[in-house]
Image (tube, rainbow, N blue to C red):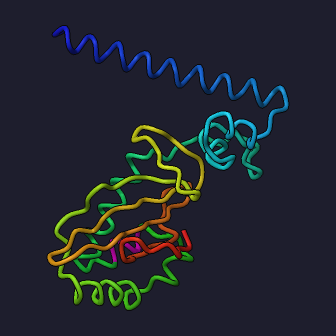
Amino acid sequence: MPRSNRGLLAAALRLDNARAALQSSVDEAREQGQSWADIGEALGVTRQAAFKRFGRPHDPRTGVAMRNTTTASSVVALTERVFTLLDAGDHDAIAGLMSASAARTLTREVLLGTWAAAVAETGNLVACRDTRAELGDKTVLHPDESVLGLSIGVTELQCEAGEWIGRLALDGEQRIVGLLVVAPGEQSLPF
């Protein structure tokens, strides 16, 4: 193994150990009665961000501890896939990725009609850029970070003659529960 690769492997191991130590410290703080707000403040994030990263709630249906199964990298990949499918007009493929409620709301006419209006202004999608995963409070997730519950994929939709921001809300099972196409800089967003 080349020397530089050994250094990378060692750094990755240190990162894994640091994450495990941080999880252990958070677990200990919770056992000592610290709130998620206290932990979030110590980590420089909101209580929601702290909970979604480190919380270990039990599923009321089964009593089993829930696991952080959604990774930021999977949110990024799904976000780019969905907006590429949208530009291709493949509503059926997108609908197959939606929750039942979202599928009732984001009908073919609504979804493709909205995108057609965007295309009329700026042309077709050329690329998704600077795609990232966020929490509901806009905390940006590290690419290999896992979270519980709702996550949001955000991407800059580079079109032929302009840009849009695409936002994709995903539930804990990575089903689409919301989709937005908004002008860059738009602040009034439901998610």
- In the depicted view, which residue is nearer to us: 81 or 63? 81
Q: In the rendered view, would you say 84 is above or below 6?
A: below
- At a point 43% along the width and 46% down the height, the residue shown is 72
Q: Position of residue 88 (x, y in %)?
A: 21, 76
Q: Which corner quadrant holds the C terminus?
A: bottom right
Magenta span of residues: 92-96
Left or right? Give the position of 133 relative to 90. right
Left or right? Give the position of 47 relative to 108. right
- In the depicted view, which residue is nearer to us: 98 or 156? 156
- At a point 75% along the width and 38% down the height, the residue shown is 38
Q: Position of residue 185 (x, y in %)?
A: 40, 71
Would residue 180 be counted in the magenta stretch? no
Q: In the rendered view, would you say 123 is above or below 23?
A: below
- At a point 52% along the width and 20% down the height, the residue shown is 18
Within the image, what quadrant is residue 168 found in?
Answer: bottom left
Left or right? Give the position of 187 relative to 118. right
Left or right? Give the position of 190 relative to 159. right
Q: Which corner quadrant holds the N terminus?
A: top left
- At a point 74% along the width and 47% down the height, the residue shown is 62
Main SS, magenta residues: helix
Q: Position of residue 116 (x, y in %)?
A: 27, 88
- In the depicted view, which residue is nearer to us: 150 or 62? 150
